[in-house]
Image (cartoon, rainbow, N blue to C red):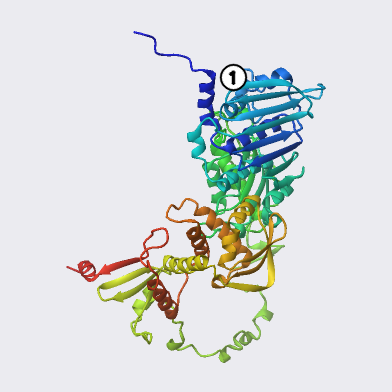
Amino acid sequence: MADLIQLLPDSVANQIAAGEVIQRPASALKELVENAVDAGASQITVNLRDAGKALLQVIDNGRGMSETDARMAFERHATSKISQADDLFRLRTLGFRGEALASVAAVAQVSLQTRTAEQELGTLVEINGSTLVRQEAVACPVGSNFQVKNLFFNVPARRKFLKANHVELRYLIDEFVRVALTQCQVGFTLLHNDVQIHHLPPSGLRERVANLFGRKINAQLLAVELDSSIVRVQGFVGRPEAAKRKAGEQFFFVNNRYMRSSYFQGAVVEAYQGLLPPGSTPSFFLYLEVDPGTIDVNIHPTKTHINFENAGAIHQILLACVKEALGKFNVVPSLDFEMDASFEFPNFAPGTPVSAPRASDNPGYNPFEQEGRRFEAGRDHRGAANLRDWQKLYEGFEKLPPEPEEAELPRTLSFASQMDQPQQARPAAGRLFLQARGRYIVSTVKSGLMLIDQRRAHLRVLHDEFLDSLRRQSGVAQQLLYPATIELDAAAATLYEQIEPLARQMGFDLERLNANTLAINGIPATVADHEPSQLLEQLLESYRMTANEPRLDALERMAYALARVGAIGHGRGLEQAEMAQLVDQLFACPVPNYDPTGKKIIHMLDLPELEAFFKA
């Protein structure tokens, strides 16, 4: 029998590795920028074209590479950062496996210009799909200049499944932000199609966060700092009133490396228990410093999932320090948070003997003695003066207004209270609507009972109205007496560029003041009761969240996004007239039974089904 097992060619092996490491342009950006940071760069410029599909360029002023190193860097598992297996448990750099450049070069056309400070001339290396095209000496500045062109040009199946440019650009911005948040001492610039998205000078952490997410976030940040024998925690958490429905501004870093951890995120969310409205999540920027020997970062191709030796203890420390930060700033009631933040958490090694704590007491202590006076049972120690003119305590009570009659009580009742008061008068139209739990509208019909989800019903009504305005380009704007300004982060500003024409058709009157700042002069009249800045922020977030709705085209997505913002919520009480109007508007819609995404609005309880409940 012939031998079947053979070694794969390097080009095939590199493409297999690229399938794990380079999933989209953002993956290549992450690897190149992290290499620039490891090279000691103080200034890094990222230049993108067509969301990185046509060009992804990273320029740094780091230490550069020699002629030999420039060629070796593209070989698989060639690295300067580890030399033996034990080095994996003492990592201080972001990259270490030595497979990133080989993986990128396997699926793209890569050009590198690099020079060290000791060299007069630099080196140019060009590689297409793992094949060396040329290597020669060139004049170039100190540092490295990587150009990645036509990503996945030789893997058409991978390129076909890349998302639209605005989606891929959002992934690129996310990766850029994660690195920028860990390297505040480095200046960063991000360009897309020659338009500057970010320019970040070297700064402190708070200023870096404000430069990335807008100046208004500065007032929402609460400082967190704690030093223990297990971990050092520092950073910021957001105020509860600034919590959002999206989970975008949530960042964990360990030893200046971005990581994902639902376990540690649960500790932060638990600290906010009772402070957040349902469905909201807090913002946080938390940095952990631990002994590199107590973590394992080599468990995932993207190195974003990390194993911790003391995960349980760190979970409790995070919970405690976030609660402390909220307490210090009077966000929650506290007893005493004036203690030094550098307290020690005990870290017992296995087998360490544990002794019970001892409490000291004073047997002669009398709680009824104070400042030399002895309190005796049955004796009033307030003095006779405090008992004079006790009648004055009741002055004014004889002038209280009479109790309100039953007819003066509010007419908006819960479903249960309306069932208890059958004598309530029906509206003039002869229909009676009941509201169950502030969520459902209940009414009788010929065949039984009809239950309507009030939020989905209103969402359907608004969606159809906004969609009609978009199709006829006849949105009505409610002009603001005092225009509002809003500063968007880079991702939101990029998304706004995409939806700007549709927003104007719906009735938004917006003026761009600079790359990320807008002036809001008017908003759609249908949602004129909303705060303009919050309305636009919620619209952008809602539109982003509808990206995966296959039922909706571009116009329907825009109409649905704004309808989600303007629709009444669950838990809101409605008057009889409001419920009647909503039901009438719902049944005037072409599709009243389902919302735009296909969720059910109306449920019917037929008479036979109702009668079955009461059969003996």
Q: Position of residue 513 (x, y in %)?
A: 72, 60
Residue at left offset 30%, top offset 76%: 444
Residue at left offset 60%, top offset 62%: 536
Relative height, residue 72 to residue 248 (above, below) = above
Closer to us: 506 or 198: 506
Q: Position of residue 218 (x, y in %)?
A: 70, 54
Q: Position of residue 261 (x, y in %)?
A: 54, 40
- The image quarter containing residue 44 is top right
Q: How many marks?
A: 1
Relative height, residue 188 to residue 407 (above, below) = above
130 sits to left or right of 587: right
Residue at left offset 43%, top offset 88%: 407
Look at the image and tell me in which quarter the C terminus lies. bottom left
Closer to us: 379 or 105: 105
* Residue 343 visible here: no
Task: Single out the residue that lies furthest toward the top.
Answer: 1
Closer to us: 218 or 144: 144
Q: Which residue is mark 1?
A: 85
How packed mark 1 is, by other alpha carbons closer than 10 Å (few <14, some 14-19, many 20 or more), is few
Q: Position of residue 155 (x, y in %)?
A: 51, 31
Residue at left offset 73%, top offset 41%: 188
Look at the image and tell me in which quarter the N terminus lies. top left
- Label 1 secondary element: helix
336 sits to left or right of 472: right
Task: Single out the residue that lies furthest toward the left.
Answer: 616
* Residue 597 visible here: yes
Relative height, residue 295 to residue 361 (above, below) = above
- The image quarter containing residue 42 is top right
Residue type highlighted by circle 1: Ala
